[in-house]
Amino acid sequence: KNFVDMYEVSLRYGEDGDGTLALQDATMRVDSGEFVAVVGPSGCGKSTLMKVITGLWPPTKGGVIVGGKEVDRPLSITGMAFQNPTLLPWRTTLDNVMLPLEIVQPHAPKFRRERAAYETKARDLLALVGLKGFEDKFPWQLSGGMQQRASICRALIHDPSLLMLDEPFGALDMFTREELWLAMQDLWLARRPTVILVTHDLREAVFLADRIFVMSARPGRMIAERTVELPRPRA
Ligand code: ADP
Ligand code: ADP
């Protein structure tokens, strides 16, 4: 049932083992379809944790199993969104959202054959986050919040079984941020990916997540885990 199983992970940066100890004995298990948040102060190792789980950086000790397989290379089953929307300025909203389909195996060959079907999917996702009518606009024609919505759609277009969100709402004003929480909740209820959200906004974690992992400052490790029980819409 555990979809993500990170066990006793320690990670020390640097070639000769004298760099920063960014993670120490961090353990985290996430069920399939669960939405968890990781909170902690700046520099506590949250981004490092994301890098380890997605296979971008090998741990010094311990390991990660995702979907029953040991992670030993970057995972293409993952969708990612960051604080910065990073849309390509020469592509429309729709084409930005479809970008992963062109490059992520095994979708790419199928995408070339069945572009129309995938385009419908991209439009559906954009409609879910309130971007109906903006499909053909370019990023610079959208507000910051709208660009971020599009980048979250892009992270979901290839139906990732794991969605990694690293402070995706951090750069937004309070009102836009709360709007996007609702959009994110709708997306999660509609698609049910396993989501790991990194944030230093505790309110955001409480609003969105089923469970919250708390990391301590130095060196980064999981110190507590709380289950959030709130009345929330369930599919
Ligand atoms: P957070 O995301 O919680 O702010 P990070 O995972 O980015 O924390 O960083 C944890 C610690 O590891 C920090 O002390 C940071 O300076 C250090 N660190 C992060 N990335 C690197 C890197 N590529 N090389 C060396 N040290 C790093
Ligand atoms: P944000 O905080 O999302 O950057 P802005 O102040 O840029 O917001 O925009 C405020 C609102 O104006 C947006 O939420 C959006 O509804 C609307 N808006 C922004 N850009 C456009 C646009 N190009 N066309 C239509 N409406 C827009």
Image (cartoon, rainbow, N blue to C red):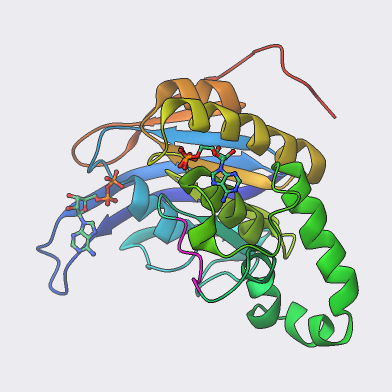
Residue 106 in view: no
**Relative horizontal placement of residue 45, taking residue 122 as reference (left or right):** left
Task: Please name whichever residue, 218 or 159, is drawn nearer the observer in this view of the structure.
Answer: 159
Given the current orientation, which residue lies at the most extreme left position?
18
In the depicted structure, whether residue 55 falls above or below residue 41: below
**Relative horizontal placement of residue 44, taking residue 228 as reference (left or right):** left
Range of the magenta residues?
85-89
Q: Residue at x 51, y 43 (%)?
A: 145
Is 190 contained in the magenta span? Answer: no
Q: Residue at x 26, y 33 (%)?
A: 41
Residue 150 picture location, percent across and down: 61, 54
Q: Residue at x 79, y 58 (%)?
A: 123
Q: Residue at x 53, y 58 (%)?
A: 141
Residue 232 in view: yes
Is 87 contained in the magenta span? Answer: yes
Q: Quadrant of residue 29?
A: top right
In the depicted structure, whether residue 106 falls above or below residue 54: below
* The C terminus sits in image quarter: top right
Q: Main secondary structure of the magenta part?
A: loop
* The N terminus sits in image quarter: top right
Residue 99 picture location, percent across and down: 64, 74
In the depicted structure, whether residue 89 falls above or below residue 64: below
Residue 174 picture location, percent across and down: 43, 26
Q: Quadrant of residue 109?
A: bottom right
Q: Quick check: which quadrant has ligand 1?
A: bottom left
**Relative horizontal placement of residue 142, taking residue 186 as reference (left or right):** left
So how many labels did they put on this image?
Answer: 0
Residue 194 picture location, percent across and down: 67, 46
Task: Please name whichever residue, 11 or 208, is drawn nearer the observer in this view of the structure.
Answer: 208
